[in-house]
Image (tube, coloured by chain):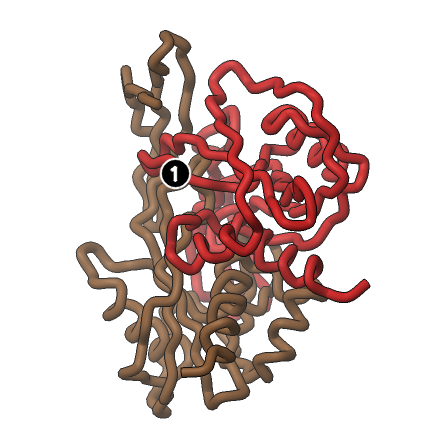
Chain colours: A brown, B red
Amino acid sequence: MLEKCKSSSRIYDGRVLNLRVDQVLLDDGTQSTHEVVEHRGAVAIVPMLNNDHVLLIRQYRYAIGKELLEIPAGTLEIGEDPQTAAKRELEEETGYRSEQVTKIVEIYMAPGYATEKIHVYLATNLQQSKTQLDEDERIETKPVRFSEALQKVRSGEICDAKTVCGLYRAGELLTKPT
Amino acid sequence: MLEKCKSSSRIYDGRVLNLRVDQVLLDDGTQSTHEVVEHRGAVAIVPMLNNDHVLLIRQYRYAIGKELLEIPAGTLEIGEDPQTAAKRELEEETGYRSEQVTKIVEIYMAPGYATEKIHVYLATNLQQSKTQLDEDERIETKPVRFSEALQKVRSGEICDAKTVCGLYRAGELLTKPT
């Protein structure tokens, strides 16, 4: 399937995202418009405090007007290696460091209109360090028994897509005999 | 945590999404900017052809420049009931109808900047009908053994977030003794 960009308008260049609108020609001559949210990509981390507990964070999400319970995450810096970003975001948001950070899944969040891919990592062997929140970040950490976190997915209390993906995938790896 | 909108600029009003940029005041006086992608929300469906096979779709995703293997999904019409939308999208995209469509999870795709919530349904008892694709939709349906679909999540061949969430959640419900 070929979709060829005929023209592109840059609508907005911002802090977290850009927006462009492309006029596209399909291979049978049909024309279409694509609104594309450009995003640098992000990392998220499932941080295991020990074999039984995962460290979640609670934060207010302005776009949806609600507090969510999530795994730590953050946008990639320009040119930053995702694993380095995962270690950085884990420490900044939770105050824990880890040298055992392994990629467990890569996901596109909204491929219908956004370029964003999230690299999700499992972090074990956490060492206490110091949080370094951005000036406008307000984050509360919350250790949760892993089985209870999965229960919160089922009940709907956890409803953030990257967190749901990360917890299920980590759950498979954590219960797998090594 | 209170975040108060001080001023809001509408940047773009489009077909699939709108963009606005808000200047926000945190409760301690800190100022911040939020770029908000407004999206009506969507539905996605895990369609079980029988106990063993799920019906996936393959389509080219212009924003990321790749074909993805996904569960059927689509944007809510204005004022549309999500369950009605799930039945409609299932039929339009796959050519199968179902009267047994049950919500299994609701997920926010990118709560850091987008309002989009996806309502994910499990559809069983599929009856053959007719596809009705939008003029610019090119979709190939692909029945996949359910266990193989989960294997494709683990291998990275399936990397669409709503699909990963839907398959894991459906997998729990399908293996649960009734």
Q: Does residue A22 appear to the left or right of A175 in the view shown?
A: left
Quadrant of the image containing the N terminus of chain B: bottom right
Q: Could you say which is closer to the camera, residue B14 or residue B22?
A: B14
Q: Can see residue A2?
A: yes
Q: Where is residue A99 in the image (x, y as percent from the top left)?
A: 27, 83
Q: Crowding at label 1, few (<14), some or many (≥20) Cα neighbours within 10 Å? A: many
Task: Find residue B2 and report its image quarter.
Answer: bottom right
Residue at the spot 70% in from the left edge and 33% down from the top edge:
B85
Where the C terminus of chain B falls, by quadrant?
bottom right
Amino acid type, mark 1: Val
The image shows a total of numbered marks equal to 1
Quadrant of residue A125 within the rendered picture: bottom left
Where's residue B29, x and y in %? 48, 66
Name the residue at 76% across, 47% down: B102
**Which residue: 36% across, 15% down?**
A26
Q: Which of B12 and B125 is in front in this view?
A: B125
Which chain does the numbered disc 1 sit on? Answer: A
Would residue B165 be found to the left or right of residue B34 on screen? right
Residue B149: x, y in percent? 51, 51
Q: Residue A27 vs residue B138: left or right? A: left
- Residue A85 higher or lower than B69, as above or below: below
Residue B122 placement, left or right of A169? right
Q: Front-most of B165 and B114?
A: B165
Which residue has dot 1 on it?
Answer: A37
Query: Please, what secondary structure does the residue beneath circle 1 have?
Result: strand
Report the residue that reaches farthest toward the left. A79
Q: Position of residue A95 (x, y in %)?
A: 38, 84
Question: Which residue ends up furthest to the top in the rendered image?
Answer: A29
Tell me, yes or no, if residue B23 can be seen here.
Answer: no
